Image: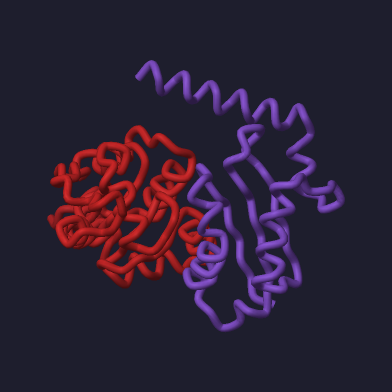
Chain colours: A red, B purple
């Protein structure tokens, strides 16, 4: 159920132009940087991962997406980018975040960490606090919905 | 779809082999000597962080591109975990870029 929702909100990173390599030296071009800026700002919770939330293609990405699911991240405020679909994104995001591995989690445009950090934060409760504070969790069910199941006795 | 299930099987097989070889147990102990490359990683971290506790294990199951690393150092004191990881990432920059993955645990002592 949740992963379906995640899948629906998955956005595909648009192909970027080839300005990335210049004289054989790799650097983060302004164009790539602003494309990643846009991706990072495209949702409250953004995950750069290998594969998709439905079909993660790496154990670390799988573990991370599962943890976000368990925390109850609202699919409406979540976006995932598959770095395997875009080699510029794959290399660019490492440089952008100054972080050598994927997955990478951003919350509210701020870099949170990779799989190990997310796992450690999930265990300590820090992740739940952060997501809650940023309003990134699925809203609790309205109490009215529950009480609707119990029909009040009709007055005579 | 097909490739995915093949991949899944390989991963299962790797896990199985690893356990069969007793590497799962090896992970828990510090007595087994490090191989040359593990030692190289160990030395880099030893020099950089003078850790109170340091563990480096190749957990790739053979291909040598997945490492489990645990560093406990005074140098991590009062530093947020993201920053601690960044310090280790920076120290191992040249090596990590060759790997598929790293499991990192840092702790201040």
> In the image as oriented, which residue stretches furthest toward the bottom?
B78
B73 to the left or right of A76: right
- Image quadrant holding the C terminus of chain B, namely bottom right
Q: Residue A119 placed where, x, y %? A: 50, 56
> In the image as oriented, which residue stretches furthest toward the right?
B31
A1 to the left or right of B45: left
Q: Residue B36 placed where, x, y %? A: 75, 47
Above or below, A67 against A120 in this view is above
A154 to the left or right of B6: left
Q: Nearer the viewer, residue A67 or B99?
A: B99
Above or below, B54 against B25 in this view is below
Q: Nearer the viewer, residue A146 or A20?
A: A20
Report the label total.
Answer: 0
B56 to the left or right of A64: right
Q: Residue at x 74, y 39 (%)?
A: B24
Q: Residue at x 28, y 58 (%)?
A: A27
Q: Residue B82 placed where, x, y %? A: 47, 69
Q: Residue A46 placed where, x, y %? A: 28, 56
> In the image as oriented, which residue stretches furthest toward the front?
A23
Q: Residue at x 72, y 57 (%)?
A: B55
Asked whether the viewer can see residue B20, the reply is yes
Q: Quadrant of residue B26?
A: top right
Q: Quadrant of residue A95?
A: bottom left
- Image quadrant holding the N terminus of chain B, namely top left
Q: Residue at x 35, y 33 (%)?
A: A55
Q: Quadrant of residue A138?
A: bottom left
Q: Nearer the viewer, residue A70 or B27?
A: B27
Asked whether the viewer can see residue A152, the reply is no
């Amino acid at each position: 159920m949740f992963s379906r929702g995640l899948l629906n909100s998955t956005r595909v990173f648009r192909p970027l132009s080839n300005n990335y390599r210049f004289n054989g030296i790799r650097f983060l071009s302004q164009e790539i940087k602003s494309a990643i800026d846009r991706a990072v700002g495209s949702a409250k919770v953004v995950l750069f991962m290998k594969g998709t939330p439905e079909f993660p293609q790496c154990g670390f990405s799988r573990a991370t997406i599962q943890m976000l699911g368990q925390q109850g991240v609202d699919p409406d405020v979540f976006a995932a980018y598959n770095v395997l679909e875009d080699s510029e994104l794959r290399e660019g995001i490492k440089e952008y975040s100054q972080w050598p591995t994927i997955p990478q989690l951003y919350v509210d445009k701020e870099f949170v960490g990779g799989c190990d950090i997310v796992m450690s934060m999930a265990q300590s409760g820090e992740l739940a606090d952060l997501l809650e504070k940023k309003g990134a969790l699925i809203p609790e069910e309205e109490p009215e919905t529950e009480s609707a199941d119990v029909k009040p006795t009709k007055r005579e | 779809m097909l490739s995915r299930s093949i991949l899944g099987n390989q991963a299962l097989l790797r896990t199985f082999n690893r356990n069969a070889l007793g590497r799962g147990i090896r992970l828990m102990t510090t007595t087994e000597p490090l191989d040359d490359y593990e030692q190289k990683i160990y030395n880099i971290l030893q020099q950089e962080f003078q850790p109170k506790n340091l563990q480096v294990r190749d957990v790739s199951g053979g291909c040598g591109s997945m490492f489990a690393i645990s560093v406990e150092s005074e140098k991590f004191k009062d530093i947020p975990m993201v920053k601690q990881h960044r310090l280790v990432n920076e120290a191992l920059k040249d090596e990590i870029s060759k790997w598929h993955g790293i499991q990192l645990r840092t702790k201040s002592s």
